[in-house]
Structures are given as structure tokens and as C-alpha cells.
Image (cartoon, rainbow, N blue to C red):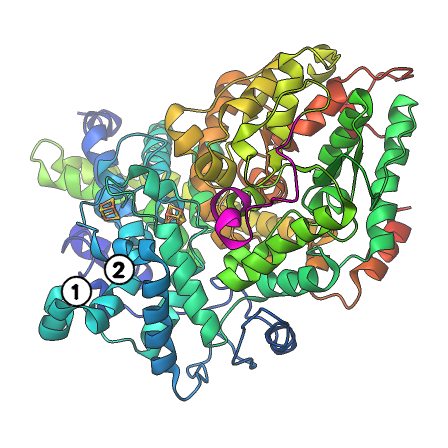
Amino acid sequence: MAVAKLEQLSQSVVQGPSLATGAIPTKDWMDIPVVFKPGNYAFPAKKDKVEYLNSQSGLHFPNARDWSPEDDDWQLPENWKEIIINGLRERLEKFRSLKIFMDCCVRCGACADKCHFFLGTGDPKNMPVLRAELLRSVYRNDFTLAGKVLGRLAGAREVTPEVIKEWFMYSYQCTECRRCSAFCPYGIDTAEVTIVIRELLHLLGIGINWILEPVSNSNRTGNHMGLQPHTFKDNVEFLADDIENLTGVRINPTFNRKGAEVLFITPSADVFAEPGLYTAMGYLILFEHIGLDYTWSTYASEGGNFGLFTNNESMKKLNAKMYAEAKRLGVKWILGGECGHMWRVVHQYMDTMNGPADFLEVPKSPITGTVFHNAASTKMTHISEFTADLFKHNKIKVDKSRNDYLNVTFHDSCNPARAMGLLEEPRYVLKHVVNNYHEMPENTIREQTFCCGSGTGLNTDEIMELRMRSGLPRANAVKYVEEKHGVNMLSCVCAIDRATLTSLMSYWNPNVGVCGISELVGNAIVLDGENRAELDEGLRTLL
Amino acid sequence: MELTEALHNNRYTIVDKWVVYTLATYQATDFLNKEKDRFANPIGSTIRTSLKTLFQLLLKGGDGAGYAEPLSQIMHLRSVQEFTPSQAVAPLNAVKHIARDILAADKQTKDLVKDLYDFEFAVDLAVLAAFDLYMQCREKVYRIRIAEIKSGAAILTDSACPSKALKNIRKINE
Ligand code: SF4
Ligand code: SF4
């Protein structure tokens, strides 16, 4: 009796699995079609944005049209199959790593349960090995003998419109965070497979607006927001006003100043959106404190590079802009703010695409004399490296107790951690500016850090539920240190994280705030001639 | 034997089956059941811990105070996963059937099945509370969406001239 009722409960409301008959009706993954419904996909790019981008020099975004993922017919161009196969062939020839990644997976499964999308959704197609298989199956079919002869038996399948839909669904449920690659014995980087799938989709005019509009804005005005020079300048000056209110010290930053020693570039979100604003205030205070000869640029007014989330041409172009501006201004080197994927591009791809930046000098701290040889080719140094070096040489005067209202933990943002190995510097800086600090569990930090769940341009609000579930593994580890140690502040060095972790925390751990490390540095710094009231909430205090 | 005692004696089996049933609503059932590290398997561990706590509370009966804590954990999960509202809540109901089934299968406890009314009523209360929590979570998601839009992030798209829009926002804030 009871079992029958229980089975009925399963059948009436819980699709699929049944306790009485045992687990899920098993089907081969290739036979499970994707279903698009509101909330599980990001809005497609607007036609005019795609057209604009395609008209720009060095960029290639063909087949603009109005379409919706919910439509049966995606109005693919007539020769879509040829475009895909040729596009794949071209990339296999151009990117040796892709060919290796397609060939050498032994399906050992070590990566399978390491992806935050898999852990938050329980959907097998979010296992990295299966995500790569979405492309690999097509590769086998058209580029390997076994696939040509044995077809499905060899895990091969023909590319169909259904496959294209599946690519769209799952390449936009991957934040290219590379956690999986840290566990793969062969070093297969599924993130790069996702990158290639997204590139191929762009050849068919398939992309999302939250990525393409910022790319087009950056191409036009130099930043994601499309902010024009005067607005960018105004905004930084507003922050200087706020600092004056809080500390009594007037800071006068310069813009587009030729002959400055250092060009400072940070994500535009730092100068316009909370809580990034406080991080930017931290930069201003730090540079004032050490008397750095630097300038902001209203043209290279964006560290972020959403080009990375589309195709290699636009990534290259947006990256080149920073260097063009450094050349124009005649600075010696570039100091980069707390950004995630800017550093991935600089550290992993810049040199091949646009390097070496011979017209610049190897970064040398004018305060300590330290030469950053690790940036010998890119000529760009991370703010945490720069600040850590200042602390090492005792060049910063701080009052740590100003951050005592906080109990801090540190989230390793995927890109700085796994794409450039920036693990110690932020921690070293934190050690010098906060008294209360606790690490999250070992398998959730450093190389094994969990993504915020909204990287690679997935930080758009129409997929909020997806973001909340993919961010679960991160939030779950934060909850642990909140309960165990009373942690109330999640610090990080990434602008996307500052925005997306704020939403993630509001959902899962509403008592935990989010900040950049430079905010904590700025709050702890004792400025010459300051006249500072008790600031209960540091730089966030409203006077 | 008293009913409460019987349920208590069978608590591991009942909770285990309840967990298995709940995790079977995800495609990756095996993994979610197997992996025991709470950081490597947040869905599995949250469901397991919360259902265990909830079962103890159900045995106590009473007015259902205290259900909210474990239920909230479960509903935070299921309300942002791809379930309809009924699918999100349904597995909570399963414990009625599981308990009944287990008691009925054993000669010693078979006769206690008729006394299950109180326990089942407690489950009913939990299910109702879960539905409220489900809605609270949904509303929270909507509020977070609005907060993101207000924070200025949405100027990124959908705005003809962000510089102008930013000026307007400033005016509103002043
Ligand atoms: S790169 Fe990150 S998001 Fe993508 S499959 Fe690997 S673990 Fe998942
Ligand atoms: S860990 Fe590497 S080799 Fe193993 S299944 Fe994953 S991608 Fe393939």
C-alpha cells in the first residue's frame, strides 16, 4: 500500500525517479534534449549590438538576427554546418592545446564532481568531462577515423541544431573557472573547451547580451559601461570627496596625464558600483599615502575584458587598448587593480596576442626599489603584489584596529588564483591590515577555490536562480566559517566577485558582507594630516 | 512498544530512505548519496543534515516551532533549482509513507501503524511551513534582482547613454 502511494507521489510531482522502481530512468546523455525556459538562459545579444561589433575593425561577429532560445527554429544561417565544421577545423589547427584536449581525455572522471555547476544543479551535463564531450563528440565524428567508422559506438555524433542548442545551454553554464583542470591528471582545461564552443556559436550569431553589450561599449568608449571621459573623471572625484569627508584629507587624482610614471587600470565597476567604490577609495588612499606618481586614464578606463568571454579577436583588441594608452601617455609601467579576468588575459594570453610590451619598462616600485621580474614581458603588476611589497618594506603606516569591526575571510577569485597563481600576496596584505581572520576549509580555497558562480559574463539578473545554485559550494564554505568563527566579511580581489558575491551572500548568508582587499588597506592607513572621526563601518560609514 | 519508541528505533533507516528519496529527485543521485565531505557535496550534505534534524523534531511533535531552521536550509536549495513548487516540497511528504511502510513490514510494530496520525499531522505542518519558506526564498531572489539593478549594474545594458543615466541616478540618490 505505502509503496504504491509513494510511487504515486513520485509520479505525480517528482518527475522521473522513483523509490519503488529504483532511480532515474536511465537514458544516454546524447538523447536528453535541452529545454529552454525563462530563468535558465541569459538573454540573446541584441541584433544591433552584434551588427555594430561585426562592423568594427579586427572583430568578427557575423549572422546578427533577432532570435530567442525558446524558439524551435533558431534561424541558423543556411550553411551553418559548414561554418561549424570549418570553424572547428581552423581552431584545431590554430590552437594546439585544443587538439590535445580533444584527444587525450581518458574519461577517468577525476574532474567529474569538481564543478560548482554540477554540485549546485546535480545535472550530469555539468560534469566537466561531459561538458567537453559535447564538443568532443562532434570532433570525433568529423575529425577522427574511429568516429567516422564507428559513429556512436566511438562516442561520435553528427552536429545538429539540437547539438547547437545544447552547446549554448552548457557553455553558458560554465564560468571558465578552471577548477576542474586542477584535478585532471592530463591538465585538460575544460575552460578552454568552453571558450572554443562559445567562439563557434558566435560564428552562427549566437551570443548573450550581457557579454556583447559591454564588449561593444568597451570598443566604443573604453569601458563596459560606455561611460564617457567626463563621467569617469567625475566619478573618481566623487570618491575623493567622500574620502575628504571621512578623513579630512583632500586627494587630487590626475587623469590622462602624460609622463606619469605609472598608469593605473582597474575594472570600471570599481568607480561606479557598490561595493567596488570602497575598493577604489582604498586605492586612492594608498597611492596618496605613498606619494605614487600615477595617472588614471579615461580611455583605458576598464580592466575587465569581456572579449575573453566571446572570441580571441575581441579579447585581443580590448587588451591592446590598455597598452596603446600606456604608450600614448608615455608611462613606465602599468599597475593593475583588483580584477579577475583582466589578469587571466594579461598573464596567459597577452604576450602571445599583443606582446611583448617593449616600449614599457619592467615594473619597479618607486617606493621600495623592488623589480617585478615576473612581469618582465607584460609590464603589468598586480595591486596585491605591489601592496605586499610595500608592507614587506614597512612603507605603509596602518592602524589595524580600524578593521576590528570585521571578522574576515578570503575568497580566492578563480582567475588570480588559478590563472596567475596569486595565492600568498593577498593573504600577506590581509595579515597586515586585519586582526580577525579565518580561512575557509582547505578544499574550497587556493587552487581548489570555488567560483562565485557568476563569472564569464554570467552575472546577469535574468539567470539569478542559476547563479544562486552554482554559487552554492562557495556560499556553503562561507556559511561554515560564519557559524564556526563569526566571520562577517568575505574579501576578494575581483570586481565581478564583489558584485556577484554580494548577491550570493544576500541569499545564502545575509550577515556576511563583501569587500575588496584595498578597501581594508585604505581603511587601516593612517594618512598624514588626517582628521578622522570614529568610523564604525570604515570607509562605508555615512557621516 | 510505543509508537515514538518504534520510530526512534528505526530513525536511521527512515532518515536514510528519506534522504535517498529526496536525492533521487536529482539526476546525479549516486554522487549526491555517496560523497560524504560536506564541502565537496553541499546538496547531499545539506539534505542529509537537515532531514535528520527535522525528523527528531517531528518525533517531538508539538506546534512545529523549530521546523523552520532545517526546512529553510532545504528550501533555500530547492527553490532555486529547477523544480516546480510542488516538486520542491514533495519529498518532505515522503517520510509519512516511508515510516508507515517500515513499521508495517515488521511484525512487532505492525499494529502501531494506526497510531501514526500525530506523526503525520506533524509532517503536514512541516510541509505547510516549507511552502511558506519556499515563497520567502523566491521573494528573496526577486529582491536581490532588484537590488542588483538599483546598484547600477544594469546600466551596463539597456541604457542609451550610461553617462546620462548615471547622472539621473545620482540625482535620485541626492
Ligand atoms: S571551468 Fe569551472 S565551470 Fe567550467 S566545467 Fe570546469 S569547473 Fe565547471
Ligand atoms: S580528469 Fe581529465 S582525463 Fe579525467 S575525465 Fe576529466 S578531463 Fe578527462
Q: For this view, does A231 lie left or right of residue B69? A: right
Which residue is drawn at the image coordinates 62% and 19% (left, top)? Answer: A389
- Amino acid carrying label 2: it is Glu
The residue lying at 42 percent from left, 38 percent from top is A473
Q: Reply above or below: A61 against A460.
A: below
Front-most of residues A276 and B35 = A276
Q: Is mark 2 within 8 Å of ligand 2?
A: no
| Front position in the image: A367 or A137 | A367
Q: Is residue B143 above or below residue A476?
A: below
Viewer-side residue, B33 vs A329: A329
Give the residue number, with chain letter if any, for mark 1: A155
Tell me which numbered mark, 2 or 1, is placed earlier along the sequence. Answer: 2
Is residue A362 on the magenta stretch? Answer: yes
Provide the residue span drawn in magenta. A346-364
Report in which chain the residue with disc 1 lies: A
What crowding class fits label 2: few (fewer than 14 Cα within 10 Å), some (14-19), or many (20 or more)? many
x, y percentage for residue B13? 18, 33
Residue A192 place in picture, x, y as percent: 39, 53
* Secondary structure found at label 1: loop
Q: Chain of mark 2?
A: A
User: What residue is shown with label 2?
Assistant: A133
